[in-house]
Image (cartoon, rainbow, N blue to C red):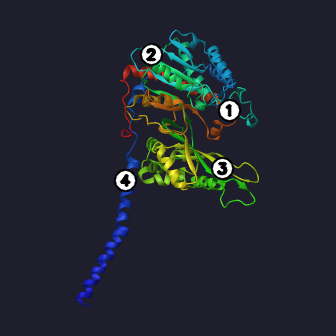
Amino acid sequence: MGLASKRKGRWRYRCWQKLFLALIGFPLAAGVLLVFVAIFRAVFVHQQTQSVLHILNNQVVDKIDESQIMQRAERLAGALKIPSVSYATDNQEKEALLQLHQYLETNFPLIHSASFIKKEVINTYSLLYTVEGTTKGKLPYLFASHLDVVPVDPSTWEVPPFGGKIVNRTYIYGRGAIDDKSGVLGIMEAVEYIIQMGQRPQRTFFMAFGHDEEISGKRGAHELAKILQARGVNRLDFVLDEGFPLSKGLIPGTDKHIAMVGISEKGTVTLELSVTGNPGHSSFPPAESAIGILAAAVARLEENPQPSLLGKGPESATFKYLAPHVSFFYRLLYNNLWLFSGLMAREMERVPLTNAFVRTTTAITVFHGGIKDNVVPPSAKAVINHRVHPSQTVTEVIAYDREIISDPRVRIQVKTSREAHPISPFGLDCIPFQMVIVSIKQVFTDAVVVPAVFIANTDTRWYLSFTTNLYRFLPTVVAPEDVNRYHGNNERISIKHYHEAVNFYYRIIKNADMLTDQVPSSTINNGDQEL
Ligand SMILES: [Zn+2]
């Protein structure tokens, strides 16, 4: 072999070597590094000790007495007999709302006769209670809840939906058992008990019970908020409204109950899509009808869901908080969403409930078209309801739809829209958030508490200007088999879980009082840098 061919051979060898490094070596090394970083994070990144925890945990944690469990259950059952249904705007069972006011007055006599509690009826049907604390000069807080319930189809219930039935001394059945009369009465039971014990809260707070949450809250919570503002109450330390209940089995990796505290709320955008065609006789139809064009557009939207945003919004904090409590495999995933979000998103989008955490959802809720069997339809209309992920804007959602539909014959009109709520602070120095965590843990001792995005809507929107500390949580356990009862059939709450709900509200009133004495008022920490 000559010198030239030897050199050529070496050069070829070096080329192969470079190609090997480029194609396999570097990606392999990068892969090894990624795996190393992921394992390091899984092993060493732990949730830090919560600063407020030790202050609150160094107290005697008293609970409400258990001897009145049945009476409390019966009081809730009695409230469930009152059909305070919201059907639509301007269509509510208004007499029932007034009956419910009367019921609360009769059944919570201590609240209604206490000199430090003022009850006001706002806009005829909503209720505002001001509990004047003994300590002046501290920021007040607000419990929000609602008096109305969603409609029922009694034929699909096994028990009368407004029968207020207690079954086997175990479950309280009725529309509103979870959403949200257990909230209204749970809060009132806690306050009634405090007065019964001869006590008075130190810190001032409001109990704001709107009457139309299920149909927007515009006349209830909105008016309640306006009244507070008119009185010069411009700032609140925190607002606690309904939200997710405690659940098991929703997120894999732990068999403990997970308490997801809503730190934001998805936005909404409702679009009307319409296509106008030329009506004519069905014996010589055009190649495409208005219905066909619109159906194809709607089908494209369903086939092409909005992009996955897992790991780009507050749900990354949900997984970081969960990570220390799950097995190594899941800790590896949850601490490394930057690497595994695609994999996890694919798993989560299989189930509608977990899919809602991954992205802006798309629901085709209405479809109208056609007027007669033998007439080519003059028009077709569809309604699309999106729930907007906090990492996306309404404009981005509409732009995506427009691109997917990609048909100028489909007219897109915005019916209503609202951006996702800002993310409330949830860091270690956010005392109200930490206090909510502690209060949950004092009652639900095995629970893992995590910040999360609430996927539905609440009255919270009307209180956004009062504080950045808005939290959404329902202090009751809903078993996986009971999830569909929520706004569905045979809604129920167990007596044990209702007792825990009352206990939670009791603890939060006690804990809020303690914090005013021992630690400074809350600071704002927006973001997850403290995790
Ligand atoms: Zn509700």
- The residue that label 3 is drawn on is 379
Tag 4 and tag 1, C-beta contact below 8 Å? no
- Give the mark, 4 or 2, whose residue is nearer the N terminus: 4
Q: Amino acid at mark 1?
A: Pro
Identify which residue, 211 or 347, lies in the foreground: 211
Residue 150 figure quarter: top right
Q: Which mark is residue 181?
A: none
- Give the mark, 2 or 1, whose residue is nearer the N terminus: 1
- The residue that label 4 is drawn on is 37
Crowd tier of the residue under label 2, counting other residues whose Cα lies within 10 Å: few below 14, some 14–19, many 20 or above: many
Q: Secondary structure at mark 1?
A: loop
Which residue is drawn at the image coordinates 73% and 61% (left, top)? 284
Residue 504 can be seen in this image: no
Q: Secondary structure at mark 3?
A: strand
Residue 46 pos. (x, y %): 40, 42
Residue 36 figure quarter: bottom left
Q: Amino acid at mark 3?
A: Ser
Quarter containing ligand 1?
A: top right
Tag 2 and tag 1, C-beta contact below 8 Å? no
Identify which residue, 223 or 425, lies in the foreground: 223
Residue at mark 3 to residue at mark 4: CA–CA distance: 57 Å
Q: Residue furthest bottom?
A: 1
Q: Nearer the viewer, mark 4 or mark 2?
A: 2
Which residue is drawn at the image coordinates 48% and 20% (left, top)? 228
- Give the mark, 1 or 3, whose residue is nearer the N terminus: 1
Residue 145 can be seen in this image: yes
- The residue that label 2 is drawn on is 202
In the rendered image, the quadrant that contains the C terminus is: top left
- The residue that label 1 is drawn on is 151
